[in-house]
Amino acid sequence: MLLHIVARGKIGRSPEAELVERYLKRISWATKLTELSDRGGKFPDAPGDSVTVVLDERGKALSSMELAKTLERWRDGGKREARFLIGAADGHAEAERDNADLLLSFGPATWPHMLARAMLAEQLFRATSILANHPYHREG
C-alpha cells in the first residue's frame, strides 16, 4: 500500500524537511510526498481504492499501535493508497473533513503544519516498523 502525504506549503530546505526525508526513506512501504500551494485549489481527487486521512486538531488521537493496526486493516482489505492530507496554517475546509475516512489528531495542541509533516512521517515509520516486528517501536 502506498503511503501518500499530500501537504499544503513548500517545506524547502529546513530541519523539518530533513526529518521528513529521513523517516520516509526508512519506511519499507512505498511512499510519496506531494506538495501543493498554500492557498487556492483543492486536494487532488483520490483513487477509488484508497482511503483519505485528514490531519485535524479535532480528529481522533491514535496511539502508534492503533495507527499500525489501522494501516494493516486497510492494506489487508485491499486499499492501494492511504492519503494523508495536511492543510495550511488555517487547516482544512469543512468538505475535506467531511469526505475523510479518518480525521487524525496529534493531540489538542496546535502544531505548525511543517512540523506536523515530520511528526506524521515519523509515525508512519513507527507504524510500519510495528507491523514488521522491527525493534524501533521500543527504541524510540
Image (spheres, helix red, strand yellow):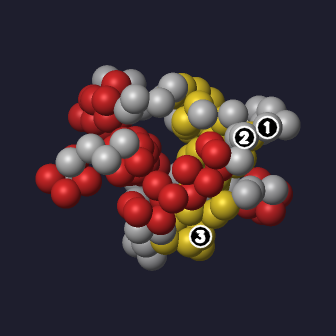
Q: Which residue is mark 2?
A: 78
Q: Which residue type does callout 1 highlight?
A: Asp
Eye-nearest disc, 1 or 3: 1
- The residue identified by callout 1 is 49
How far is mark 1 from mark 3, CA to CA? 23 Å
Which numbered disc flags the more N-terminal residue, 1 or 3? 1
Secondary structure beneath disc 3? Answer: strand
In this view, 136 is above or below 47: below
- Label 1 or label 2, whichever lies nearer to me, is 2
- The residue that appears at 41% across and 48% down in the rendered structure is 131
Q: Position of residue 95 (x, y in %)?
A: 82, 57
> In terms of depth relative to the viewer, which is nearer, 74 or 32?
74
Q: How many marks?
A: 3
- Residue at 69% over, 34% down: 80
Foreground residue, 34 or 65?
65
Mark 3: which amino acid?
Gly
Q: Quick one: label 2, few (<14), some, or many (20+) residues within 10 Å?
A: few
- Residue 4 lies left or right of residue 41; in this view the side is left
The amino acid type of the residue labelled 2 equals Gly
For marks 2 and 3, give the one nearer the viewer.
2
